[in-house]
Image (cartoon, rainbow, N blue to C red):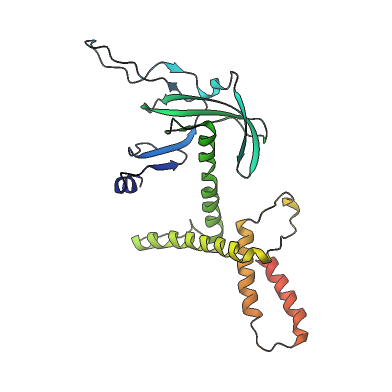
C-alpha cells in the first residue's frame, strides 16, 4: 500500500506513523514504537581494504531503551493526547537489528505523571528532536479514535464483502458518514449540544463522537416531527416531551 503512493510521488517525502512496518520505500519515513528490550547497535565499522571475510553489517552493541532510562535523563512537559504530562527521557541515534543500515532516532520515555509505563519510540527522521518524535506518534491517536468510533457506530468492520465493489464501497462510505457527522457538528450541531448527566464521566469536558451522532439523530427526528404544519398550541408540551425522549434514546 505504501509503495503505490510513494512510487507515484517519488519527489515527495511520505511520513508514516504506525505500530510497525518493514520494507519501506526510500522516500518514506516511519515513526513507531519500539520494545523496551530492543537490541540497538552503532554504525557498522568501515571495512579495512584487503581484509578477508564478510564485512560487518552491525556496529557495537548499545544500551537498550530500558537500560537507557537507568542513567540520568532530561525532563520535559508534553502537551499530547489532550493533556499535559511530565516525563523523563533519554535519546540516541542507533540502528535496530532488523534494519542495521538505517540510522534511527531512539527515544526512551518514563512518564512521571499519568500512571503510564515507560515506553520507547523511534523515527527514521534521525535529525528530529525528541519532542518531534513524541508529537508525531501522538498524532496517530485521532486516527485510532476515528476507526474505533466508525466500528462501534457505523459497523465499519461488520459487513462481509465478497466482491471487489463491496470492499471498495462499504468502508469508504462508513468513513465518509463519520466525516460528515463531525463536520455537521462543528458547523451547526454544537450550538444546540446539551451534555447528558453521566455519573461515570464526571471529568468529560468535550463531546465525544457518540454525542455528535446522538445530536444528529435527535435533530433529524426533531426536524421531521416539528415540521408538522399548523400544529395547535396545546401540542407544544407533547412535542417537548417527545424531543426530550428522542434526545435520551439517541
Between 162 and 201, the one lying in front of the other is 201
The outermost residue toward the left is 50
Between 186 and 70, the one lying in front of the other is 186
* Quarter of image, res 104: top left
189 to 67, vertically: above or below: below
The percent coordinates of residue 120 (x first, y second) are 53, 30
Residue at 64 percent across and 70 percent down: it is 218
Residue at 39 percent across and 59 percent down: it is 167
44 to 244, vertically: above or below: above
Residue at 63 percent across and 74 percent down: it is 221
* Quarter of image, res 112: top right
Determine whether, in the image, residue 117 is placed left or right of residue 167: right
Residue at 67 percent across and 34 percent down: it is 115
140 to 238, vertically: above or below: above
The percent coordinates of residue 98 (x first, y second) are 38, 28
Determine whether, in the image, residue 58 is placed left or right of residue 129: left
Determine whether, in the image, residue 52 is placed left or right of residue 46: left
The outermost residue toward the top is 51
Amino acid at each position: 500500500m505504501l509503495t503505490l503512493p510513494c512510487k507515484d510521488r517519488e519527489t515527495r517525502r511520505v511520513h508514516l506513523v504506525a505500530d510497525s512496518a518493514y520494507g519501506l520505500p526510500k522516500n518514506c519515513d516511519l515513526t513507531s514504537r519500539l520494545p523496551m528490550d530492543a537490541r540497538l547497535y552503532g554504525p557498522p565499522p568501515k571495512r579495512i581494504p584487503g581484509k578477508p571475510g564478510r564485512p560487518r553489517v552491525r556496529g557495537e552493541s548499545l544500551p537498550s531503551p530500558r537500560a537507557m532510562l537507568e542513567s540520568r535523563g532530561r525532563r520535559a512537559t508534553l502537551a499530547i493526547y489532550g493533556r499535559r504530562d511530565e516525563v523523563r527521557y533519554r535519546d540516541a541515534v542507533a540502528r535496530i537489528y532488523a534494519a542495521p543500515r538505517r540510522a534511527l532516532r531512539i527515544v526512551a520515555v518514563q512518564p512521571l505523571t499519568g500512571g503510564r509505563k515507560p515506553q520507547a519510540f523511534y523515527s527514521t527522521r534521525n535529525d528530529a528532536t525528541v519532542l518531534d518524535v513524541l508529537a508525531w506518534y501522538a498524532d496517530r491517536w485521532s486516527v485510532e479514535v476515528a476507526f474505533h468510533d466508525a466500528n462501534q457506530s457505523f459497523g465499519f468492520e461488520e459487513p462481509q464483502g465478497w466482491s471487489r465493489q463491496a470492499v471498495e464501497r462499504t468502508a469508504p462510505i462508513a468513513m465518509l458518514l463519520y466525516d460528515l457527522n463531525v463536520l455537521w457538528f462543528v458547523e451547526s450541531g454544537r450550538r444546540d449540544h446539551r451534555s447528558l448527566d453521566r455519573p461515570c464521566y464526571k471529568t468529560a469536558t468535550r463531546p465525544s463522537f457518540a454525542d455528535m451522532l446522538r445530536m444528529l439523530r435527535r435533530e433529524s427526528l426533531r426536524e421531521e416531527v416539528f415540521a408538522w404544519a399548523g400544529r395547535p398550541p396545546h401540542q407544544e408540551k407533547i412535542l417537548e416531551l417527545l424531543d426530550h425522549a428522542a434526545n435520551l434514546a439517541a
